[in-house]
Image: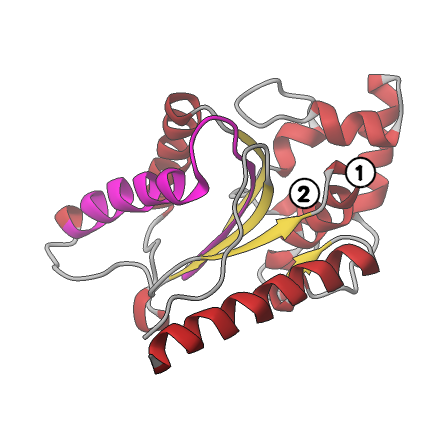
Amino acid sequence: MARAWREEYKGGIYHVIARGNNKEYIFKESIDKGHFIKQLKVCSAAMGCRVYGYVLMDNHYHIIIQTLDKKLQEIIHQINNKYSKYFNSKYKRVGHVFQGRYKAVLVQDERYMLKLLRYVHQNPVRAGICKSVKDYRWSSDIYYRKNINGFINISVIYEMLDKQIISAKEKYKEFMDELEEENYSKLEAIGDEAYVVLCLSRKEENQRTLSARHDV
């Protein structure tokens, strides 16, 4: 069976979604989420990539990430592989922790990250876990809300909101309180109309090529 189409290039920004195998939990306790965040921090530094945002739900996670020197496949493989070993060891289990291949949606450029970040941070609100983004502990929201210069690259989002840090932080809070209506989990590409059409045409061309090879 042919692998799903995925376009990668140096400097690409991606919305990555990885789900638990058979929709099972990948985080059973708070300590598991804490371990994953630490692993994400270590891997992002070791693999030379930029993380702009994340949210950890019980059976899946979302990450907004930009590749630099390493391919996205290498980065996510390392993150998921290391966490899987931790999870299987802790819970004395064997087999896959994550369901198949992760989903990676290409983002045209930084301009399209703001609303995507809101979608990512509002996942717990949509799931009915909390009433507000600020009430959920396991997302990158706290880095933006409190202007923490950690492993989350907050400067790009801040600069889009305001040149003054204090004003940018307040505008961020207001923006996060507004409902994000777009369902970014269902998109095949994130950008303007021409960019999305281009990505979809490349996907179709790739599928035709794979089909032709299969028929030979």
Q: Which residue is more in the foreground, 44 or 179?
A: 44
The vertical placement of 50 against 196, above or below, is above
Q: What element does badge 1 sit on?
A: helix
Residue range (magenta): 59-88
Amino acid type at mark 1: Lys
- Number of residues whose C-alpha sits closer than 10 Å to that of mark 1, classed few (under 14), some (14–19) or many (20 or more): some
Q: Going from the N terminus, do you reach mark 1 or mark 2 first?
A: 2
User: Which x, y percent locates residue 116?
Assistant: 70, 50
Residue 84's place in the image compared with 150, above or below, is below
User: Which image quadrant: the N terminus?
Assistant: bottom left
Assign a secondary structure to mark 2: helix
**Mark number, residue 3:** none
Residue at x 37% of width, y 60% of height = 101
Q: Residue at x 57, y 28 (%)?
A: 152
Residue topped by disc 2: 134
Magenta region includes residue 72: yes
- Can residue 6 be seen from the camera position used here? yes
Depth order, front residue of 58/13 = 13
Q: As rendered, which of 22 and 106 lies closer to the eye?
A: 106
Amino acid type indicated by mark 2: Lys
Residue at x 83%, y 44% (from the top left corner)? 175
Where residue 141 sits, quadrant-wise, is: top right
Q: Tell me, yes or no, whether the two marked residues, 1 and 2, touch with CB atoms within 8 Å.
A: yes
* Residue designated by label 1: 173
Residue found at x 73% / y 40%: 109
Residue 130 visible at all: no
- For residue 22: magenta? no
Residue 193: x and y in percent read 82, 60
